[in-house]
Image (cartoon, rainbow, N blue to C red):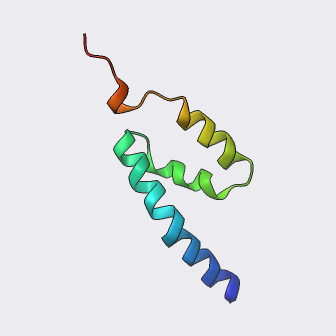
């Protein structure tokens, strides 16, 4: 039972902010699930860091 409570706390403290950030960046918020998978979360952070961000898009 305590592990379920820990999971819910992690989702609230970590999942919801990641969900909102990904939505603002134009990515699917379902990528939040990747944040909870070991090793995959590190890879997804690297991919996110090198992606085109909305504030860095150059105008023609």
Q: Is residue 14 left or right of residue 7?
A: left
Q: Which of 39 and 57 is in front in this view?
A: 57
Above/below status of 22 relative to 5 = above
Above/below status of 43 relative to 10 = above
**Image quadrant in which you'd find residue 3:** bottom right
Residue at far top of view: 60
Residue at image point 56% right, 77% down:
8
Residue at far bottom of view: 1
Above/below status of 54 relative to 36 = above
Considering the image in quadrants, where does the C terminus appear? top left
Q: Is residue 44 left or right of residue 23?
A: right
The spot of residue 57 in percent (x, y) is: 34, 22
Residue at far right of view: 39
Considering the image in quadrants, where does the N terminus appear? bottom right
Residue at image point 73% right, 54% down:
38
**Image quadrant in which you'd find residue 6:** bottom right
Q: Is residue 19 left or right of residue 3?
A: left
Number of residue marks: 0
Q: Is residue 46 left or right of residue 24?
A: right
Q: Which of 33 and 12 is in front in this view?
A: 12
Residue at far left of view: 60
Residue at image point 55% right, 77% down:
9
The spot of residue 36 in percent (x, y) is: 64, 59
Residue at image point 68% right, 88% down:
2
């Amino acid at each position: 039972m305590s592990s379920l409570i820990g999971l819910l706390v992690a989702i609230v403290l970590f999942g919801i902010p990641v969900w909102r950030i990904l939505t603002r960046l134009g990515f699917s918020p379902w990528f939040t699930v990747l944040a909870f998978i070991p090793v995959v979360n590190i890879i997804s952070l690297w991919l996110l860091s090198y992606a085109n961000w909305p504030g860095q898009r150059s105008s023609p």
